[in-house]
Amino acid sequence: MENKCGKGVYTPDIKTDKAERIVPTVPLMQYDGFLRPGDDKVARTLGDACVAEMKKNIIADFERTAAYCEARGEENPDQMVHVSTFVIIDGTVYMTYYANTGTDQEDPQYQVARLAYCPLDDPADMTVLDVQKVGEVLDGRTIDRLYDTILLYKGGEELYILWTASPDGNYYRLYRTFNIKTHSFGPIRANRFTVGDITNDFSISGMKAALTANDIPFKAMWSDIGIMQKLSTREENGETYYYTGAYSGNFNCIIKSKDFVTWEYVSTPDFINNSLWENATYVLGDKVYYFVRQQECNQGFLTVYDLKTNSWQTPFLIADTQSRSDFIYYKDTLYLIHAPLNRDGIGIVRVDTEDIRNSKPLLVADMKESCFYPYTVVYGDEAYISYTVSRKHIRLTKIGLSAYTEETR
């Protein structure tokens, strides 16, 4: 199926005669401290209370179910769903994820990017829309793979939906807007990736060419390209920049944008490590707090990038951390939300922003069931959390934060 609203989507990469400089993936050897959240008895006790609250306060599942399809005369309900992002605006929840209606496998060759929304107090009144699916033709190129789908919002009537898709074998970051008043999509366009004075499409080839042209070495990129959901802001030269993390395989970096369309490369850790996939970031003042899991390892590393001095801090390790992590900021305190190796729960660590070596665990929650890729948004004193259950459900729940913060211990 041809996407009629997408023309002139792609631009040629600015090429370079320079050779790529690939950084090896090597286990991290130099670090400044090590934290084992699972050894903290108080954290485990609070975790039990958190599990009970999360299960009690389930708001809704957002996948396209058999019942949803039957009620609307539609076919092919979702058999696999994964990776959620949401925002709550004027009492309505907007949720993005990707799905597979053909099999129960996470397979980018058969996936579709999704947007679902419903009133917070009436989840049964849900609408589920396709953003893009494999097999569509966009500006003359067939979409042969599709993956991570996120939602970004900076106020007003427009949501920005960003996802990774492969037109004819080269992964891109694509985006389109959704107007919450008219419930209509804008055209699909390609995100852009800037390094120095080079701006290419935000694609694997575009990223590699822009980094290489600026003599920036990078670790191996492979498979899809991800952009993390959590945004934090910094004022620079009178303008607001939105910071987050980006990744492809072993390559991870900090990026920033003014408009959610063009993303500027900021930096990547300059010490040897074996990071893999998702990198959580949060900017406070002149510092970017940064956490990422490591490949074939039982811990992730927490570090800080100084935007004034362009320097990275010696990393601090946190054990039993796997998968996608997240930061939240609550009552002037930064917290890291991480997932254990078994992906059956969450952990919360209070980050000491003066000295990350003094960070401490607040809770370790074992759901005794799948709790994949938690994403958390703070509204007042409540934390709303979306997560994947066994790649079958996109679930939203909430907890009261005050019971789990440092001040209550």
Image (cartoon, rainbow, N blue to C red):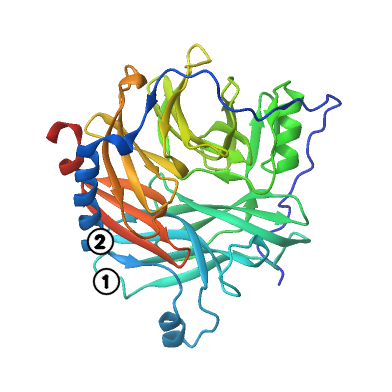
Name the residue: 27% across, 60% down: 91
- Where does the image place residue 206, in percent across and percent down from the top left? 73, 38
Q: Nearer the viewer, residue 94 or 248?
A: 248
Q: How many labels does the image show?
A: 2
Question: What residue would you read off at disc 2?
Answer: 55
Name the residue: 44% across, 66% down: 183
Element at badge 2? Answer: helix
Inspect the image, locate mark 2, and give the three-letter code of the amino acid beneath it.
Lys
- Where does the image place residue 299, in percent across and percent down from the top left? 46, 34
| Mark 1 neighbour class, 10 Å CA radius: few under 14, some 14 to 19, many 20 or more | few
Name the residue: 52% across, 18% down: 30
Name the residue: 34% across, 47% down: 346
- Where does the image place residue 240, in percent across and percent down from the top left? 44, 31
- Quarter placement of the N terminus: bottom right
- Quarter placement of the C terminus: top left
Q: In which quarter of the image is residue 53?
A: bottom left
| Mark 2 neighbour class, 10 Å CA radius: few under 14, some 14 to 19, many 20 or more | few
In the picture, the disc for residue 122 is 1
- Where does the image place residue 314, in percent across and percent down from the top left? 48, 17
Left or right: 311, with 374 as reference point: right
Q: In this view, does 388 lie above or below 63?
A: above
Q: Work out whether residue 168 can be spotted.
A: yes
Inspect the image, locate mark 1, and give the three-letter code of the amino acid beneath it.
Asp
Q: In this view, does 172 lie above or below 33?
A: below
Element at badge 1? Answer: loop
> Marks 2/1: CA distance?
18 Å
Left or right: 368, with 78 as reference point: left
Q: Is residue 32 above or below residue 47?
A: above
Q: Nearer the viewer, residue 5 or 79?
A: 79
